[in-house]
Image (tube, rainbow, N blue to C red):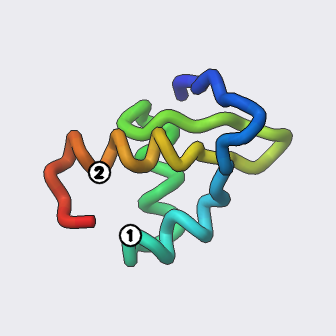
Amino acid sequence: MTTVNNSPTENLLTVAEIAAQMRVSKMTVYRLVQSGAMNGIRFGRSYRVSEAALQQYLDSANLPH
């Protein structure tokens, strides 16, 4: 897992929010974060992903968004 430097004004999304946007399961998002394909931050037992990191992943994966 890689961490992202976030500005105070940048929104952090939950795994559930990302899964809903991408129309995949939460487990898929967990795997992307844990493999390093999508940058995320761990808070205790949960993860948060910045909107910029999500956009970067979508751009690199050439997925329609």
Comparing 42 with 60, the one in front is 60
Q: Is residue 17 left or right of residue 7?
A: left
Three-letter amino acid code at the position of disc 2? Leu
Query: Which residue is at a point 29% across and 51% down the rendered structure image?
Result: 58
Secondary structure, mark 1, is helix
Q: Which mark is residue 58?
A: 2
Label 2: few (<14), some or many (≥20) within 10 Å? some
Report the quarter where the N terminus lies.
top right
Split into 4 quadrants, where in the image is the C terminus?
bottom left
- Check whether the beta carbons of the residues at disc 2 and disc 1 lie within 8 A of each other: yes
Q: In the rendered view, would you say 45 is above or below 22?
A: above
Outermost residue on the right side: it is 44
Residue furthest left as drawn: 62
- For mark 1, does the 10 Å Cα neighbourhood hold few (<14), some (14 to 19), or many (20 or more) residues? some
Residue 18 position in % (x across, y down): 52, 64
Disc 2, SS: helix
Q: Residue at x 85, y 40 (%)?
A: 44
In the image, is residue 14 above or below residue 22? above
> Depth check: 16 or 5 in front?
5
Residue, disc 1: 22
Q: Which mark is residue 55?
A: none
Residue type at mark 1? Met
Which corner quadrant of the image does residue 10 belong to?
top right
Determine the residue positioned at 66% across, 35% down: 41
Image location (x, y in percent) of residue 22: 38, 69
Q: Quadrant of residue 3?
A: top right
The relative height of residue 9 versus residue 20 in the rendered view (above or below) is above
Q: Position of residue 40 (x, y in %)?
A: 58, 37
Outermost residue to the front: 9
Label whose residue precedes the other's in the sequence (2 or 1): 1
Mark-to-mark CA distance, 2 and 1: 9 Å
In this rendering, position of residue 46 left or right of residue 33: right
